Image: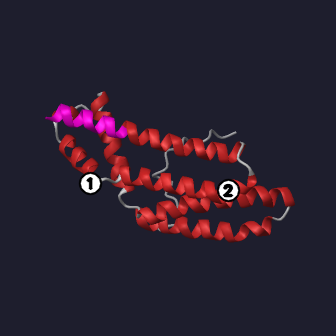
Amino acid sequence: MTQNTFEQLCHYAKETALLASVEALLEWDERTYMPDDAGPYRAEQMTLLSGMVHKRHTAPQLGQWLAELADGPLAKDPHSDAGATIRQLKRKYEKKIKLPQALVEELTRTSVLAQQCWVQARKNNDFSSLRPWLEKTFALKREQAQAYGYQEHPTMRSWTTMSRTPRPAK
């Protein structure tokens, strides 16, 4: 039963990754070839896709598969392909379920529309027009931080948890 569950999990994860890659392709197209007037429609396309991907990342069935597999024999060796897959998908699942779908969708919509505004602001040398989008983005990112939770003050980054190698002294 565990092997069958793992195969179902992998198939589901592959389909989810395919949807996420379509979203990434739309984002790339938006930033390279898309006509200026298509921005609001593209925002709705990407919002729809990000919502679909989020639903898949947080589906109860996915949580059930991961719970079943996390304590099973396939996850015993954390360095095996199956063990690493289960561990990474479980970590992603536990993070994604903290975010409300409406927030994920609004972050996507705002990001696309703010990008379109930035392009025009840059072209017209009118960066003050971008201010409302930046304020909205910061507010949404604060909501996201609240949803994820944090150990310390939300605006402080703990240097002990960062995975950066210090630069050598000159």
The residue stretch that appears in magenta: 1-13
Q: Nearer the viewer, residue 51 or 107?
A: 51
- Most prominent secondary structure in the magenta stretch? helix
The residue at 41%/61% (across/down) is: 99
- Secondary structure of residue under mark 1: helix
Q: Nearer the viewer, residue 157 or 133?
A: 133
Which numbered circle lies on residue 39?
2
Q: Residue furthest left?
A: 1
> Against 15, is 147 above or below?
below
Amino acid on which disc 1 is placed: Pro
> Against 145, is 164 above or below?
above
Residue annotated with mark 1: 60
> Left or right of 12: which side holds 110?
right
Instruction: Tell me the quarter of the picture where residue 66 sits.
Output: top left
The residue at 83%/65% (across/down) is: 126
How crowded pointer 1 is (Cα within 10 Å; few <14, some 14-19, many 20+) is rated as few
The residue at 21%/32% (across/down) is: 74
Q: Position of residue 138 (x, y in %)?
A: 59, 67
Amino acid on which disc 2 is placed: Gly
The residue at 45%/38% (across/down) is: 18
